[in-house]
Image (cartoon, helix red, strand yellow):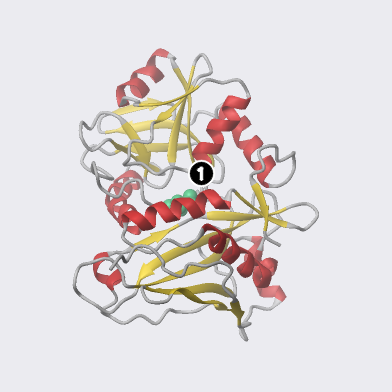
Amino acid sequence: MSTTTSPTATFPIPFKTTRSQAARVLAERESILANPGFGKHFTDHMVSIDWTVEQGWHDAQVLPYGPLQLDPAASVLHYAQEIFEGLKAYRHADGSIWTFRPEANGERMQRSARRLALPELPTDLFVESLKQLLAVDADWVPSAPETSLYIRPFMIANESFLGVRSAHRAAYYVIASPAGPYFAKGVAPVSIWLSTDYARAAKGGTGAAKCGGNYAASLLPQQEAYENGCAQVLFLDPQEGKYLEELGGMNVFLVMKDGTLVTPELSGSILEGVTRASIIQLARDRGHEVQERKVAIDEWRDGVASGQVVEAFACGTAAVVTPIAALKGKGFVAGDESAPAGKLTMALRQELTDIQYGRVADRHNWLTRLA
Ligand code: COI
């Protein structure tokens, strides 16, 4: 029996909403929204949709945020059958709430599901689940500059079975967390640590999927990065250990002296970032050449020394666009750790966030209204 497709994945399916009796009062919510940090506080509700081989997607609910009940034998706890997404809700000046390219996240979640042998959630249902959550938790979207509501959809295999095989039972959830900047220092330039002892992904592995296991594997090298004063770790390709892949939780770009942007090609082992794709588009719109190709680590290191590489930045939903001041590794520092943010980096960041916050026209039709 096929277990990775949903036999009755019809949309729409009805949502049942149960309001929380323990929703935070205005003063408590406002104090959280005034200083949200990243990923520390959660809204009053969450979405849950169940899936079984027999029934497909069913029992869609918005319910009070709270602990999940999992059988200790649930496959996710043993074999890490888990995938997730990350996107944001932005409050515009008129109070309306919008999200950015949600179909791209929904489609990526389907690709992740295929790789992790989980059921594919229809994209319409993915987008509807965000709307349903925001219908009750809209007040949790902050309005201060550069703040947003970070939305975390995720899916787990929750069948009680210790045999190793694809899921016959799964659940999809959406939680949300008011967010300020991902890095503690805000939008300030960060240093990056080159990991040479560890790879993030293998050829044919799960590197292109957004699954928890990839992030678990990045934590030890990420620790090494922190110990060396760096905010993120950079991984090289798993075969030759020579080409840039991605950072612990974001994609990477270099800006060359002639204005060309260079970013690692989608090798099959790096994540197809929605922010990455958007930056490529915005840079091309400005007339910059953008090369998606193999980028050797020496090209970065030597390019900084020769003046060929003039800027570098990380990008992702959480990181938005974060300038990179220096690349560090065992025995070397390329760049100046106290260098200011690059001009093009900040211009692209500004343009992207202007679109997301409705400050300029959405010329690519990237925004979807949530509330
Ligand atoms: C995101 O940018 O949404 C991510 O999923 C990265 C995560 C490690 C915070």
- Where does the image place residue 95, in percent across and percent down from the top left? 77, 58
Q: Amino acid at mark 1?
A: Val
Mark yes or no: residue 325 visible.
yes
Residue 364 place in picture, x, y as percent: 66, 38
Quarter of the image for the C terminus: give it.
bottom right
Q: How far from the left and from the top, in percent, is residue 104?
A: 52, 48
Q: Name the one closer to the observer, 272 or 305.
A: 272
Q: Residues within 10 Å of mark 1 (few under 14, many from 20)?
A: many
Find residue 60 and report its horizontal and vertical position in percent: 53, 75
Give the quadrant of residue 361.
top right
Residue pointed to by mark 1 = 274
Q: Nearer the viewer, residue 364 or 350?
A: 364
Left or right, 117 with respect to 17, comes to left
The residue lying toward the viewer, choosing from 76 and 24, is: 76
Q: Residue at x 43, y 39 (%)?
A: 251
* Residue at the right extreme, as displayed: 94
Q: Kindly tell me whether residue 229 is visible in this rendering.
A: no
* Residue 24, placed above or below residue 80: below
